[in-house]
Amino acid sequence: MSGAWYLGSRYLAFHKLKSTILIASITLMLFHPAATRVLVSDSAAALTARADRTPLLLGAAGSPLELVLNSLYFHAGQPSAVSNETLAQMQATGLGKFIPLNTRFHSRGNPIVGTTLDYFTFRGLKLAGGRQFGMLGECVLGAGVAVQQGVKSGGYVVSSPETVFDIAGVYPLKMKVVGVLEPSGSADDDAIFVDIRTSWVIQGLGHGHQDLARPEAGAGVLSRKDGVITANASVSQYAEITVDNVAEFHFHGDTSQFPLTSIIAVPPDDKNATLLRGRYLSNDDGLQLVVPSAVLNELLDTVFTVQNYVILGLAILGLATVAVIMLVFLLSQQLRRGEFHTLSRIGASKTYIGLLVASELAFVFVGSLLLAMLLIFIMRQYALQILQTFLTF
Amino acid sequence: MPMIEMANVAFRYQAAAASTTPANQNAGFAMHIRTLAVGRGERIALVGPSGSGKTTLLSLVAGILRPQGGRVQVNGLELSRLGNAAVRQFRIGQVGQVFQSFELLDYLSILENVMLPWYIGRDSSNTQMEKADCRHRAQTLLEEVGLASRINDRPDHLSQGEQQRVAVCRAMLNHPPLLLADEPTGNLDQANKQTVVDLLLEQAQQNDSTLLMVTHDQSLLERFDTVLDIRSLSSEGVPS
Amino acid sequence: MRMVYGFLIVLLLAACSETEHAQSSITENAATRPLIVASNYPLFYFASQIAGDEADAPQIVLPEIEGDPAFWAPSTEQIQLMQSADLVLLNGAGYESWLDWVTLDRDRLVDTSAGFADKLLELEDTLTHQHGPTGEHAHQGTAFTTWLDPRLAMDQAGAVATALEILAPDQAERFRNNLSALQSRLLDLDRELADTFAALGKQPLLFSHPVYQYLQHRYQLNGVSLHWEPDAEPGNRAWIELQKILRVHPAEIMLWEAEPLSSTAARLAELGVQPIVFQTASNRSGQGDYFTVLSGNAKELQSALKMP
């Protein structure tokens, strides 16, 4: 190594605090806008990737963004429900595959997603262990839920009541975990998947109890008349669906009016997609059919605009930082005039002294650049986890 | 051939010349040396009142300053005919300098400080010794001055006397034929003064170097072959 | 120092590459022969006849079901079998009550009675329950033993064949030929049963259990259904009820799904009612296939009626 570079490196090593502060400042100055860009672009890519893979989404008329965020990312903000009958109508069109979702409920913060087996094929989800749910009351966990709640196949999760005082409302159902999915790097990792009908049981639209026709259920019977048995309030309902009692679970009311959060529509080709969109063009029927990627692109346009302002702000801040750093260097050189005079007297040229100063600058800037790149590299590896942890999607 | 020959040397500090001095305190100062000859191997003490140009004379001999007129010849080299790079090379390789304020670099170990002329000269000279040889030379010098066990210490861990000993080692790194010392004992106590002067004289003796030392200390003069009063060199200029 | 620089350069180069998340879909049934699961024996039989027994024919499976498949509660393993199947043949008409709580892929379900939904018969005397004074609801009220009417069985077989053709179009011709042969045999069975029941005319009949609705409808039988089990003693109230019925509906023959208890048979005889076994063939029996059983039923009846 050249003498000047060596002396420069020794100078930096001796002034550890100053060097550390300089390198840290420049590293932050370089890292911050790059990190902002990486996080925004990675989050946009993740958002849009999932949205791109979801051709069409049907829900109640209202905010398309709320519908998309809730149905794709199980985000908070529950849109109005659509009826199960709407699903039947869509299926009757034969214009594609239709996958219902009911995302109203949670278990210790993790969304419970009521759906059908088609969802797993559609999202390319694979089981890491156990099996697929086969009956009411069974559930399959996303990889993240298994870790967060410390549950595996054979264990249980319980649905959370919507309010503390919701005595007659949402059903705190104990559900058996029969499988755990492989990590997918998406919102599915943090979700608990159940049969759509299980979500209706949680909502209290279905329940199980003793067969009231049996003599042993006598205490729960209010009256028997004209082939109608009226139960009283004492009849106890099952808080868990098991193989022994599942056959006794039933739904009251018209199941065609049971609620869904949304319906994912997967038409096989563009023609069917166009036909489908034409059917739900107007919102007269209280429904909206949206293209998730288009909805998100609108949101992302805003995000990118904000990002540009943020980066502009950071750039201005960066310039100010550079100015301060240059001031520090200049002051440092002032303080080193005696040293430079000594070097000159011993025989150092101005070029040599210039190299000495330049080496300090170079080490600081190159070191900062390398450190910033290292941090960006590390951040890129964990960008998605960071986003999912702090942005909850 | 004398080690140092100067004839009709005229020098005046310009405003720009202050770039080689920390403060422009000598701006306007002028000196004229009619003649000076210093033989090889001589030990000369240079005396004179403050501001009489002793440091300026040393700077002219070392090639740090260029006279506006006259001839400065050192070890057979006429400095005015050399380019800047050649003058610097000459200074690194043939002139050892010791300064009043020691002027060691606080971020280098004392070993690295002794090797400093090598670090400065390595990029421009291909006649330098290899690093290992330089390191060995530096270690030997430090052994001679009793600092072998402290080669990795920084200057601020040494006493003033020890620091000046390191500075002498630095000056002797390249076996210079000419040793210039500008009041090397000015910041030392009496005991250390003697030690440092002994060291300079010893090194000059060992190396057969010519020693030109500026001093105000009368008690040291008897140690030198010649005591030269700068005023006797007809330096007409006085500080303004 | 050099090692640090080298390490950082390596990291820089690695940072240039993108990491990708590899995702793969749930493994589909990779068997070369499609797997078909039937929910009862008649469908299993029809599908087997239609599929044939060539090496590449679809594999038809009837899970091990104890007792009447109408009351089947599939085990976890059986549910997994159905989930892995290419098709699940359903009788429909509310037969598979387990569909209310089992999770299956809707696109793989074949409701073989959907094609004649307008011909399904409503059950009488539906038992309902409700919670509190309001909120009444009724359970499923459709008769589901559709295969006892050979004409409806032909339609069900046709639905099976259609589903198999979609699943294995390269074997469609064989399926059609086999279907044709099967439907021909069903026509013959229909004629046999028609001739047998014609001999009864409008003679009152009793049915031990409400499972003969389609037989009754097809052959215009004058029958009344009870709720008696072959392996259980009818209670006193049941006998009293029977006597009341016999006063206005003087039946001399009572069809049973299986042999009743000897005590029951004896007491019936006292009342002038002859129990005759008419198996529904809903599950495998050790007594032959669908045609053997139903034709055997006809012969049993012919014998009781002393037909030539």
Image (tube, rainbow, N blue to C red):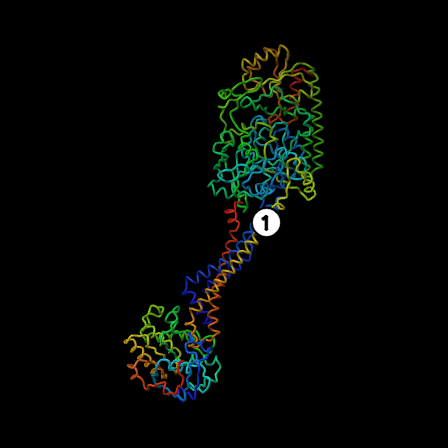
- Find disc 1 in the rendering and name its residue: A302
Q: Position of residue B9 (x, y in %)?
A: 43, 86
Q: Position of residue C127 (x, y in %)?
A: 58, 21
Q: Nearer the viewer, residue C206 or A77?
A: A77
Q: Nearer the viewer, residue B96 or A380?
A: B96
- Taking B7 as reference, is A59 left or right? right
The answer to whether residue B179 is seen in the rendering is: no
Q: Can you tell which quarter of the image residue B170 is in?
A: bottom left
The answer to whether residue C119 is seen in the rendering is: yes
Number of disc labels? 1
Q: Residue furthest front?
A: B240
Q: Position of residue A73 (x, y in %)?
A: 56, 43
Q: Quadrant of the C terminus of chain A?
A: top right
Above or below, C256 relative to A363: above
Above or below, C88 relative to B205: above
Q: Nearer the viewer, residue C130 or A282?
A: A282
Dot 1 surroundings within 10 Å: few (below 14), some, or many (20 or more)? few
Name the chain under label 1.
A
Q: Amino acid at mark 1?
A: Thr
Q: Position of residue C13 (x, y in %)?
A: 53, 60
Q: Nearer the viewer, residue A337 or A6?
A: A337
- What element does badge 1 sit on? helix
